[in-house]
Image (cartoon, helix red, strand yellow):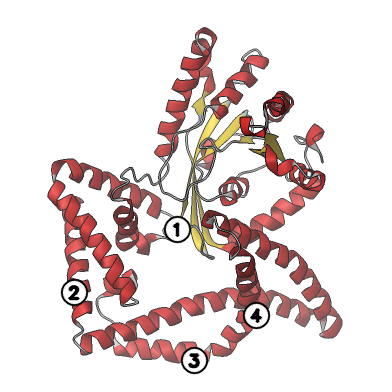
């Protein structure tokens, strides 16, 4: 599979996508929530336009929640080495040349443009991240014109008969870097490029700008967008304080709860500025004090931590400790080894991409080898298979075990604060209650 036939179906790529997608959707993330798939039709010529906050994980989020073998565009400088270029073409990634690559290199985009037309005609789906580069902020930045230019030029080259549809995609990560988080992917209603055909024929630049503005508006509807630079930290933390417990909710995802909360805050900012600033102030105070006291927001929300329940929890985790130890083989292998490489990477938005890539690479080597060794040394064969299946199952159990252990210890810690009449803890609870009461007031 090379550049010349990148739009063709590849069985080897299909196998890799299946394996990598399983790891991505079921192991790396604890839950992947996908909404709006009904907005995608395999009969349409589609360009996907996701927001770009988490490096390569943004592209993978689209790849592993959509059908087929979509083609991606990436900056050309990563294609310099022949082996790397061959690998990227196999992974269905095409280069895009920029002015910084040299004026002469820009002519290479003509060939890439011809290939994107083949991709669109073949109905593979083309993925372009219209913000250009990534940034670890929950905010949609200005879109580049490139995606609109590709759409219009492809239509023009096909005599405006493709009827290309741009699918806005909203991506939301419960945490950008951590393992076993929640990913929410929302496919919005298609933006019809044909609506701008006549305008494009009259004035290219105005058509590009209007399509870009429309696309920006549609993507913004699907993501958490915190417009305020000054109060960004407070508002971002408020999402966790108020809606953190809804992270796994599929019926009404946290993404939409966060959007509603932010909309209310924006309204309060203009009509009740004193309340707005009080909410932001309390959010930061609760964040700092909770971290100082090593207390989670979910524990603050519970109010009561019955001693009997905590003791039962300790008995439960004590009884299952051998399973935890067994599962730790899995978690240590796939979590600790990637950390060695991550430490070398300055851009933290790439940490998740590297962690996923290394952990999946280890899995491709580890599991086949493990299965062969078990079949050789363990009898009967079905016992080998059971042990093989048990390794990842106990690994995920080990992860959840660690979370439960942390919450039980957190419950005991809170009881200790209460019994010792810890003033810092009581200040934290007063601020937390005051904050929640203010939020309840603005949401009425």
Left or right? Give the position of 336 relative to 254: right
Label 4, label 3: how many angstroms apart (C-alpha)?
A: 18 Å
Label 2, label 4: how many angstroms apart (C-alpha)?
A: 41 Å
Q: Earlier in the sequence, mark 1 or mark 4?
A: 1
Label 1, label 4: how many angstroms apart (C-alpha)?
A: 26 Å
The quarter of the picture where residue 371 lies is bottom right
Is label 1 or label 2 in front? 2
Q: Which mark is residue 174?
A: 1
**Residue 131, x across and y down, in percent:** 51, 37
Label 2, label 3: how many angstroms apart (C-alpha)?
A: 34 Å
Label 1, label 3: how many angstroms apart (C-alpha)?
A: 30 Å
Judging depth in this view, the residue of 183 and 416 nearest the camera is 416
**Residue 5, x across and y down, in percent:** 80, 34
Q: Earlier in the sequence, mark 1 or mark 2?
A: 1
Is label 2 or label 4 in front? 2
**Residue 357, x across and y down, in percent:** 66, 59
Q: Is residue 239 visible?
A: yes
Label 1, label 2: how many angstroms apart (C-alpha)?
A: 28 Å
Q: Residue furthest right?
A: 376
Left or right? Give the position of 416 relative to 322: left
Q: Residues within 10 Å of mark 2 (few under 14, many from 20)?
A: some
| Residue with the mark numbered 2 | 427
Identified at 57% across, 55% down, the residue is 350
Q: Secondary structure at mark 3?
A: helix
| Residue with the mark numbered 4 | 329
| Residue with the mark numbered 3 | 318
Identified at 59% across, 36% down, the residue is 128
Left or right? Give the position of 358 relative to 382: left
Q: Are marks 1 and 2 in contact (CB under 8 Å)?
A: no
């Amino acid at each position: 599979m090379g550049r010349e036939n990148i739009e063709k179906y590849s069985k080897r790529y299909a196998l890799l996508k299946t394996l990598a997608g399983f790891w991505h959707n079921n192991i790396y993330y604890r839950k992947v929530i996908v909404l709006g798939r009904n907005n995608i039709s395999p009969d349409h010529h589609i360009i996907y336009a996701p927001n770009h906050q988490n490096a390569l994980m943004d592209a993978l989020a689209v790849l592993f929640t959509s059908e087929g073998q979509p083609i991606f565009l990436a900056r050309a400088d990563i294609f310099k080495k022949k082996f790397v270029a061959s690998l990227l073409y196999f992974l269905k990634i095409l280069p895009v040349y920029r002015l910084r690559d040299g004026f002469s290199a820009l002519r290479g985009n003509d060939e890439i443009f011809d290939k994107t037309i083949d991709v669109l005609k073949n109905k593979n789906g083309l993925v372009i991240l219209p913000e250009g580069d990534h940034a670890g902020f929950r905010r949609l930045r200005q879109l580049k014109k490139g995606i609109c230019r590709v759409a219009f030029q492809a239509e023009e080259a096909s005599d405006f008969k493709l009827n290309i549809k741009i699918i806005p995609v909203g991506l939301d990560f419960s945490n950008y870097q951590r393992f076993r988080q929640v990913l929410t992917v929302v496919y919005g209603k298609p933006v019809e490029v044909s609506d701008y055909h006549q305008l494009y024929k009259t004035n290219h630049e105005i058509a590009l700008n209007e399509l870009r503005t429309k696309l920006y508006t549609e993507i913004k509807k699907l993501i958490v967008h915190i417009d305020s630079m000054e109060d960004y930290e407070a508002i971002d933390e408020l999402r966790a304080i108020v809606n953190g417990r809804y992270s796994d909710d599929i019926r009404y995802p946290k993404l939409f709860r966060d959007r509603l909360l932010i909309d209310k805050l924006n309204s309060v900012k203009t009509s009740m500025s004193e309340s707005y600033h009080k909410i932001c102030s309390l959010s930061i105070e609760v964040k700092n004090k909770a971290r100082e006291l090593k207390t989670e927001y979910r524990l603050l929300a519970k109010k009561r931590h019955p001693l009997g329940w905590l003791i039962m929890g300790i008995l439960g985790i004590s009884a299952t400790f051998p399973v935890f130890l067994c599962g730790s083989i899995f978690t240590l292998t796939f979590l600790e080894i990637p950390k060695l490489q991550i430490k070398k990477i300055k851009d933290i938005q790439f940490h998740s991409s590297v962690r996923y890539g290394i952990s999946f690479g280890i899995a491709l080597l580890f599991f086949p080898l493990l299965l062969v060794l078990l079949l050789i040394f363990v009898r009967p064969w079905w016992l080998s298979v059971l042990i093989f299946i048990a390794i990842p199952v106990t690994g995920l159990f080990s992860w959840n075990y660690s979370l439960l252990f942390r919450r039980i210890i957190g419950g005991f810690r809170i009881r200790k604060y209460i019994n010792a009449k810890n003033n810092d803890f009581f200040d934290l609870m007063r601020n937390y209650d005051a904050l929640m009461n203010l939020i309840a007031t603005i949401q009425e």
